[in-house]
Structures are given as structure tokens and as C-alpha cells.
Image: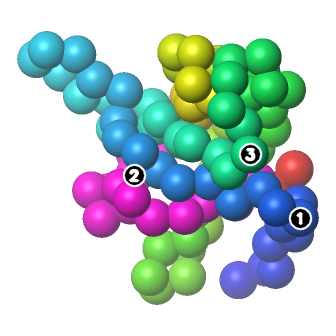
Amino acid sequence: MSEVKVIKGMAGTIMNYRRSRHTQHTRHILIKFDGYNNDKEAAKLIGREVVWETKSGKLLRGKIVATHGRKGVVRAIFNKGLPGEALGTKLKIWK
């Protein structure tokens, strides 16, 4: 696979899917980045692309589209839904 350029210090943790009472949206992912503790800091990440690597080496790409709450969590939409094994793992900002 192609080498992924990582912006220094921009590793985030996948927290959960965006969900409601009866539905979970597996393409919409909530991400917490280290060092971003409020919504104003996290808003600077909107528009960036993120990448998550599977165990087999595939790269799944998404885009940060909005903040989620006031504690620095952002919401990203991926082209394909992420599997459940992705929850709690790290992803990186690609662009």
C-alpha cells in the first residue's frame, strides 16, 4: 500500500459510531484527538481527511465534517462503514 503521511501529533482514538436510540450509523464515527479539549479547538480540524488501516493493510478514508459536543470530539464520515473492531483503535490525519 502507499505510505501514509501523518501530521505530527495528530493521532486520534475512535470512540464510537454516531448513534441514536434505535439506529447506529457505521459510516459516521466519533473521534477524540489528543490535545483538543473543547469545541473551538476541535473546529480547526473540520475539512481534514483521516485514515484508518485494517489489519490486512487496507486504508479506509474519511473526512471530518463537524464537532460533536463541547469536549473536543469530532465527527467523521467514511466512504465505507468501519467494522466493530475499529472501535477504540487509533487513526491518523492524512491531509
Placement of 71 over or under 63, stated as above or below: above
Query: Which residue, given by chain and number where applicable, does mark 2 sit on?
Result: 82
Quadrant in which residue 70 is drawn: top right
Q: Earlier in the sequence, mark 2 or mark 1?
A: 1
Q: Name the side, left or right, on which 10 lies relative to 86.
A: right
3D distance between C-alphas at marks 2 and 1: 24 Å
In-front residue for pair 34/82: 34
What number is the disc on residue 27? none
Membership of 92 in magenta stretch: yes
Disc 1 residue crowd, few under 14, some 14–19, many 20+, Cα 10 Å: few
Q: How many marks?
A: 3
Q: Name the amino acid, label 3.
A: Gly
Quadrant in which residue 78 is drawn: top right
Location of residue 79 in the rendering, given as x and y in whole percent from the top left corner:
54, 41
In this picture, which residue range is highlighted in magenta?
Answer: 80-93
Placement of 32 over or under 84, stated as above or below: above
Q: Name the amino acid, label 2.
A: Leu
Helix, strand or loop status at disc 2? loop
Q: Earlier in the sequence, mark 3 or mark 2?
A: 3
Query: Which residue, given by chain and number where applicable, does mark 1 sit on?
Result: 8
Q: Name the amino acid, label 1.
A: Lys
Viewer-nearest of discs 3 and 1:
3
Disc 3 residue crowd, few under 14, some 14–19, many 20+, Cα 10 Å: few
Residue at the (36%, 27%) spot, across then down:
18
Residue at the (30%, 65%) spot, across then down:
85
* Viewer can see residue 65: no
Placement of 87 over or under 29, stated as above or below: below
Q: Residue furthest left?
A: 22
Query: Which residue, given by chain and number where applicable, does mark 3 sit on?
Result: 35
Membership of 47 in magenta stretch: no
Location of residue 6 in the rendering, given as x and y in whole percent from the top left corner:
84, 66
Placement of 67 over or under 28, stated as above or below: above
